Amino acid sequence: MDDPRTAARIAPVPLLSYDRARDAWPLDPRIVHLNHGSFGAVPSEVVALQDALRREADLSPVGWFPRIAEKVEAARAEVAPFVGADAADTAFVPNASAAATVVYNALQLDRDDEILVTDHGYGAVTMGAARLARRFGGRLRTVALGLLDDADTVLARFAEAIGPRTRLIVVDQITSSTGRRFPTAEITALAHEHGVRVLVDGAHAPGLIPDAAVAGGGDWWFGNMHKWPCAPRGSALLVTQAPDRDELWPLIDSWAATEAYPARFDTQGTIDATTYLATPAAIAFIEREHGWDRTRDTVAEIADAGARIIAEAFERAADEPALVDLPMPVPSMRLIRLPLGIGRTREEADDLRMRLFDEVGVETAFTSFAGAGYFRLSAHLYNEAADFEAFAERCVPRILELAGR
């Protein structure tokens, strides 16, 4: 590393019970982990708790499944305040895309009604919106937002886009492909002035934004707990106070179907609800070991320093700025430009991700926006200087080679 001060800023993070945060996660030391934002990482003690819960279910299925609703209800009561919500407004769902599907399934449109999405939207959620529009002969229209548009400009774009047939807006609180925030609460207020409803995709928001559901606004909000809160995969929240929320149904019809929202979501046959039940422990782990406010500050420092290491490696070869100075940034995610011709589409970006994993053992996230490729860095407490140095040493030369540099 050229600058020892940079290394100092991303020295191993000490936790209350660990000298190094890395030791609290069961991550393979042979792999460089620089993509927390996609699939998360579960602390060892939370893994152990989920294993114990599964073991309890296996030892006595009849003692487990008939009582699962009360267990899930108790977990909801613990988790909902973390996103600023009331348990009575909050349902567990398997993931963010499932939450979007639950909402889409409840909506009805008239022919030629319009749904607005953005060109930063998560692909699966946008696909669901398109299916909703097709089902009723409606239209899906994309609001184009510049990568560097500030909050006022984003709001102005929506003000221009809302028309007499607009019925629904689907917008990200934190974008997956570009790693920035949008002013969703202000967009919601604007939409409501026109009688338009808003679905806020807060997949990345829990843990990164305090009281994320309240901050997000929207008629419906959803967020993943397996990302920054480090819960087991398969844990997400759907939050709504919408007057028609009793039209929301789980993706699986089960014996709780006669219950009102959200209780009808607490029982869904034999699904593995241990993901939900272990979620409170994941949230409590971060709070106990480092504190959530402090964690947001720490991961921001790690992401800043790590992004600088990687950007400088690209800049030495290309002699052009690599680090993107995003408006409305988030604590743990940074965007770094790839050389021209690399990662221009989602398919190319995904291929590059797996190529580098297979060839050099680095877990990454590459994204594309407006025909350009980016490395989306996403860090957590367990990341250290060596992780970012490994990307600079192993990945940057290979990327430059693929780009013909």
Image (cartoon, helix red, strand yellow):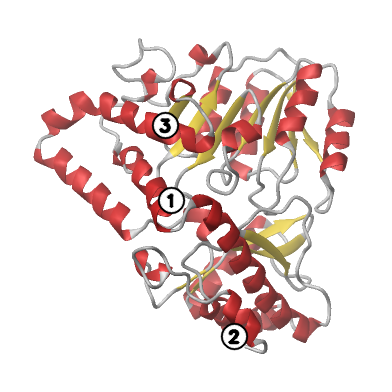
Give the mark, 2 or 1, whose residue is nearer the N terminus: 1
Up/down of 296 relative to 139, above or below:
below
- Is residue 232 in view? no
Residue 38: percent from left, percent from top: 52, 55
Quick one: label 2, few (<14), some, or many (20+) residues within 10 Å? Answer: some
Write down the quadrant of residue 267 in the picture. top left
Q: Quadrant of the C terminus?
A: bottom right
At a point 59% along the width and 26% down the height, the residue shown is 220
Q: Secondary structure at mark 3?
A: strand
The numbered dot on residue 287 is 1
Amino acid carrying label 3: it is Phe
Image location of residue 208, percent across then percent down = 58, 49
- Res 380 label: none
Above or below for 389 versus 203: below
Q: Please state which of the two labelled residues, at mark 2 or mark 1, is closer to the viewer.
A: 1
Q: Nearer the viewer, residue 338 or 401?
A: 338
Mark 2 falls on what kind of element?
helix
* Nearest to the observer: residue 84 or residue 333: 84
- Tell me, for residue 393, which label it has, or none: 2
Q: Position of residue 391 (x, y in %)?
A: 58, 78
Instruction: Check if mark 2's residue and mark 3's residue have beta carbons within 8 Å.
Output: no
